[in-house]
Amino acid sequence: MLQSTYFIDLLHAPLSRRGGYLALANRNGGVSQFGKTTLYLSAIKSGGSMGNLNSQSTCRQVALELMSGPTALPTCVSTTPFEAILQSEKGSARFCIAERRLLMGRGTDGLTLRISPPPAMGPFAGKPMLLPNGTWKFPFSDDNGLLIALRGTITALPTGAFLLAPDAEGVFEFGIEEYAEDPGDRPLESYPSYDAALAALEKEFDDFCAATYPSLPAEFEPMRRQALMTTWSLMVDPDGYASYGHTMVKMMRFLFESAFGWQQAMQAIWLSRDIKLAWSILQSCFDHQDRNGRIADAISYTSGLGKSMKPPFQGVALDWLLDNRDLSSIPLEDKKYVYERMAKWTEFFFKFRDLDGDGVWENQGAIETGWEDAAYFYVGFPLASPDMNAYTVRMMDALAKLGRTIGVPEAECAAWTKRADELTQKIIDKLWTGERWVAKNVRTGQAADSLSLPMFAALILGKRLPQDIIDKTVDFIWNNGFVTPYGFASESPKSPYFKHGFTGGSIIVPAQLIMCLALEAVGREDLAKEMGLRYARTLRDNGMFHIHNALTGAGERGLVAFGEKELFWSSWASSCYLFMAERYGK
């Protein structure tokens, strides 16, 4: 019986490529066994299967099946870095995302391929249409598909499916091109051969690998290309149609087909060996900024501003880049773009999120904290927390540094530093008890005393903090259960509020990066290395999931909704893996 082999299992991450929205996936909640797989082509642009929490996933649109006569053959699916291989006992077919809008496939064993778009829904739904050049236009996801036979013959079935029969040599070769508008006048002879397309795809990916992480320390090298492929395949670029103004990195296929603002700030750090790429990603955070200065949280292909936001981590990223990378190749106008918009973002918090007017701002709901289900929210909102305000301090520091490099008057730069000094003291006065950090509901005055890690990310203030606060904070973290063999737990397993969830006790990506950078900032590079290596090994051994179980290290795949039965690997995790492995694995 046939068995699948994998570069990445399609049940862990659909096969896709940079800049495109096509993906090849196994069935929702499927398995990898022979006879129990179904290969689907998908094109997701609207943010994922985001609808009713319990709605059926609509991410998989076109089924691809090998046929022998009228019978669909049992198959399994293997993957290489660039191909999905549909295998049966009688032969196989290979598929790759050849261009950003083009799937190509080839079979050489005399089999027929059945291509089944979803049935047309409603009396006004479009139906397949034969065009003069012999190609077929059909409704596909949010747009249209064009089915092109480069070798073999297409037959349309009454069901709306197509059969692609091989030519006299037993070969079929075809493309499905995705169109946001009516198909243009691309000549059939302009489509690449399958082999040429595969070679070009491989070169593009290899160039990205060379520019970002050409190698990793030996213990992490075996997962380097899988992590790079996960990140690369989730990168999106301006294309004349999308809402993206700069390169961004989406979080995950299907469930979270959006690029999230504070994740872009982290990606700018992780991908900063290619500094022009990193700066473009940092700029992207500000492409959708409202008149008040708030920047959007989730950016999908079709949408910009959303109602929610996420923490102002962009300042930490800029500060890190200024201290760790050569920015001389970044054009002055691009630096000014970030400075002007980051300044407006900074002011937003004090104009619109400081309800009690004491100069320490508050979050107004869980979603905008980035921690969603953290235990310290039990005191309610509006909630002032030390970590959020600490990010703002770092943002002011970064603005002062960047301002001095782009010709901003010294008085303005000095004012940023003065405000950062003042906010640091206010954070200490309001949210440090003398022994630990707390968050406070500014309406009731109630302080949260849960063992929630985010509050202790105030260490990101670095040497701005007095040494005794640094020492007590580090001791508190190490003596209260946050430190696990797999990384930092977002809520200590010793806490009465501990649960697995997302930020209620799991090992999650942002907590690892933030705490490692915070430890470095206070001079505890030894502890940052210890924990960074623990987390990199967790990702290496358990997969690039953005949530891991704090008690076992296993990837948490079942915390899902919107019709998807399992989480896929995340660029949030894959890029963090690369950074941690390189930085701490030397």
Image (cartoon, rainbow, N blue to C red):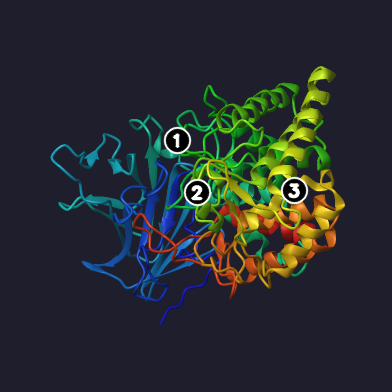
Q: From mark 2 to mark 1, how far is it between C-alphas?
A: 20 Å
Q: From mark 3 to mark 1, how far is it between C-alphas?
A: 27 Å
Would residue 487 appear left or right of 195 to someone viewing this image?
A: right
Regarding mark 2 in the picture, which secondary structure is present there? loop
Q: Amino acid at mark 2?
A: Gly
Q: Amino acid at mark 1?
A: Lys
Determine whether 540 is above or below 519 in the image.
Answer: below
Give the residue at x 47% y 73%. Answer: 4
- Residue 203: % across, % down: 63, 49
Quarter occupied by the C terminus: bottom right
Q: Return the residue at label 1.
A: 307
Quarter occupied by the N terminus: bottom left
- Residue 46: % across, % down: 39, 41
The numbered mark, 2 or 1, whose residue comes first in the sequence reads: 1
Q: Nearer the viewer, residue 403 or 218?
A: 403
Regarding mark 3 in the picture, which secondary structure is present there? helix
Q: Return the residue at label 2.
A: 380
The numbered mark, 3 or 1, whose residue comes first in the sequence reads: 1
